[in-house]
Image: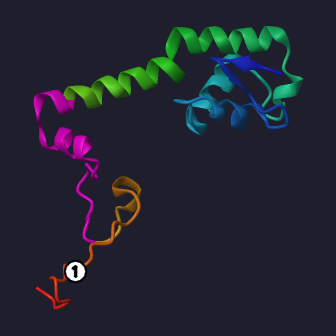
Amino acid sequence: MARIAGVDLPPNKKVEYGLTAIFGIGLPTAKKIVAHIGIDQSKHIKDLTDDEVTKIRKLLEAEYRVEGALRAEIAADIKRLIDIGCYRGTRHKVGLPARGQRTRTNARTRKGRKKTVSVYRGPRGERK
């Protein structure tokens, strides 16, 4: 089983698609990596030699930010936005969409589960 950047790659997938299991590597980047190293596109992760896995690991360390380093960078960028108090930073702080999406409907991913607001009824049960 190939382990690159702290991630166990799925053995039954082709190399291009298996590399996308690493945070920060999408399909276009994975295709560039495979082409740069010269691995056959039809090869599966389980068929990689130790030498090829080492080449992939060295290339990722040298040229790409992935996994922990990338997550730390993203977190630092968001923290910077919050610290300077810009609009996007306040949206991140409050947990609302930061890129102009509507919130009257939708936006449930950012806002969380619905919070039902009930109508206050006074002591005798009438609406106020």
Instruction: Please state the extent of the stretch shown in magenta in the rendering.
Output: 81-104
Packing grade of label 1 (10 A; few <14, some 14-19, many >=20) is few
User: In this rendering, is residue 70 above or below 113?
Assistant: above
Q: Residue 42 location in percent, x, y? A: 83, 35
Q: Secondary structure at mark 1?
A: loop
- For residue 8, side relative to residue 65 (left or right): right
Looking at the picture, tell me which residue is in the foreground, 28 or 115. 115
Can residue 65 be seen here? The reply is no
The answer to whether one can see residue 55 in this image is: yes
Reply yes or no: does residue 92 show up in magenta.
Answer: yes
Which residue is rendered at x = 25% and y = 48% of the image? 98
Q: What is the x, y in percent for residue 21? A: 65, 33
For the C terminus, give its image quadrant. bottom left
Q: Is residue 89 above or below residue 123?
A: above
Q: Mark 1: which amino acid?
A: Val
> Which residue is most to the right?
47
Q: Quadrant of residue 113?
A: bottom left
Left or right: 61 as drawn, with respect to 79: right
Which of 96/126 is in front?
126
Q: Which residue is mark 1?
A: 119
Q: Residue at x 27, y 52 (%)?
A: 96
> Between residues 49 and 23, which one lies in front from this camera angle?
23
The residue drawn where x is 21% and y is 46% is: 91
Q: Quadrant of the N terminus?
A: top right
